[in-house]
Image (cartoon, helix red, strand yellow):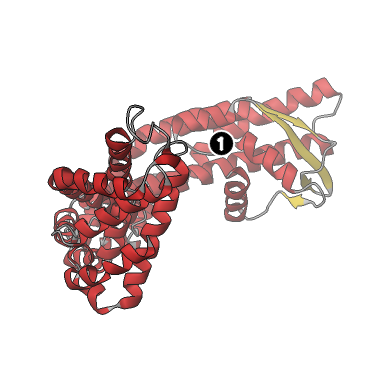
Amino acid sequence: MRHRHLRRSSSFQSAGFLGTSTWASNPMSMRCVLLAFAVLGVALILQGCGGPPDFVYDECASKLTYILANSTVDGVADAQSACKSTFVALTQQQLCVARQMTTIQRARSNLMQEPVRQCGEFVMAEVCSKNSECGGKAENLKPTTAFNAVASFFSHKSQSILDNYAQKLKENIQLITQQHYDEKFNSRLVPQIVRNQCTLTMETKVDDVRLTQPPVSAMTIGCNNQAATAGHVVGSAWYTACVSAGTEAIIAALSLWKKNFITQCTAGTLDAVCPKGSACAIETSTADPTALTTTANTWVLTKYDPAEAQALITLSNMATGWIFSGPSRLFEVNGFKVTTTHFATGGVYFAAGFTIIGLGAFFLARRRMQATREVRVMADIDDLAEELAVELE
């Protein structure tokens, strides 16, 4: 079989692999191509346990490679067309075209397996059936007989194989190009002007005291009742720690809600101004600044009131679900070690309202993270949120 491949090397060099002229001037590339198909042949052989012998699959792959090398199926035109139809911004189109060979190689993956398999099955059915000289046993198949059958298969099937290969290659190229577009779209940068406008407009609406005072009052009453039940005096260190830890939890929850609201605002603004298929969908820096600020401002004014109403309900439910116990070490308030042991349905309320991480999960995560060290109540909220995100991944 090695000699049969070598005899065809001149045909490869003159035609160019899959119509790409660069292969003809690069012997190393040619050896890599032949090696790749040799590996493919081995893979097919391993998968074909009990089927055609190794040399049949090898001959089928060799013949198919030769046919494809002399055809016009190379995928370059399809890759360029996919880039232009998928990406709108000229720069993105150029970047897409620059990586077209990578796209084509991914699109070609496994496309040869099916016709090679069909070729092998044809050989066995044609010249190695139970009633043939081979008797249905692969080890009895003569190479000359098998090679003639392979030639017969491709003499009748070449055009249909090429047509099917070209269609599947085109579909795969389009699919891979679209996936590449989606990856860029999903990771696009948020212009700072959008984040700033969302933040500034929200700050004109939010009133921290009005949002936290009712739940803090409810939580204080809860601490009073828990103190009485546990035999602690109102005003004691235990009661003070309960109120302090609960207040800090409510403040942390409100901070997380604000951040989530701003994130939703930036996403909503970009979806409106730079949707998929637009010129700024990926290159958000090219978006109209006036359109971005106007849309962000409108988004906040439209969404804030219902969001705030839900936040009030969520914080209230959190406060009434606050159950406190002092022995474990999570917080340190005025030198007294305190912790939370339960946070009734806080996470459920937040998930339903604004997809904010439940504070119950927050404190349970912190307990695991801080088994050997203490954490003060007045820790920076941003750091707590970041550590929580890592813990819950």
Against 287, residue 385 (above or below) is above
Q: How many marks?
A: 1
Rendering quarter of residue 69 = bottom left
Tag 1: Cα neighbours inside 10 Å, few (<14), some, or many (≥20)? some
- The structure residue drawn at horizontal position 24% and vertical position 79%, both measured from the top left corner, is 25
**Which structural element holds mark 1?**
helix
Whole-percent x, y for residue 383 in the image: 61, 55
Left-right relation of 27 to 316: left
Image quadrant where one finds the N terminus = bottom left
- From the viewer's side, name the closer residue of 6 and 302: 6
- The structure residue drawn at horizontal position 27% and vertical position 35%, both measured from the top left corner, is 126
Q: Which residue is mark 1?
A: 213
- From the viewer's side, name the closer residue of 150 and 103: 150
Report whether residue 143 is seen.
yes
Report whether residue 206 is seen.
no
Image quadrant where one finds the C terminus = top right
- From the viewer's side, name the closer residue of 219 and 17: 17
- Looking at this view, name the residue that lies furthest to the top: 229
Whole-percent x, y for residue 301 in the image: 29, 42
Whole-percent x, y for residue 39 in the image: 42, 57
Against 129, residue 30 (above or below) is below
Left-right relation of 351 to 2: right
Residue flagged by tag 1: what amino acid is it? Gln
Left-right relation of 201 to 87: right
- The structure residue drawn at horizontal position 17% and vertical position 68%, both measured from the top left corner, is 15
Whole-percent x, y for residue 214 in the image: 55, 31
- Looking at this view, name the residue that lies furthest to the front: 133
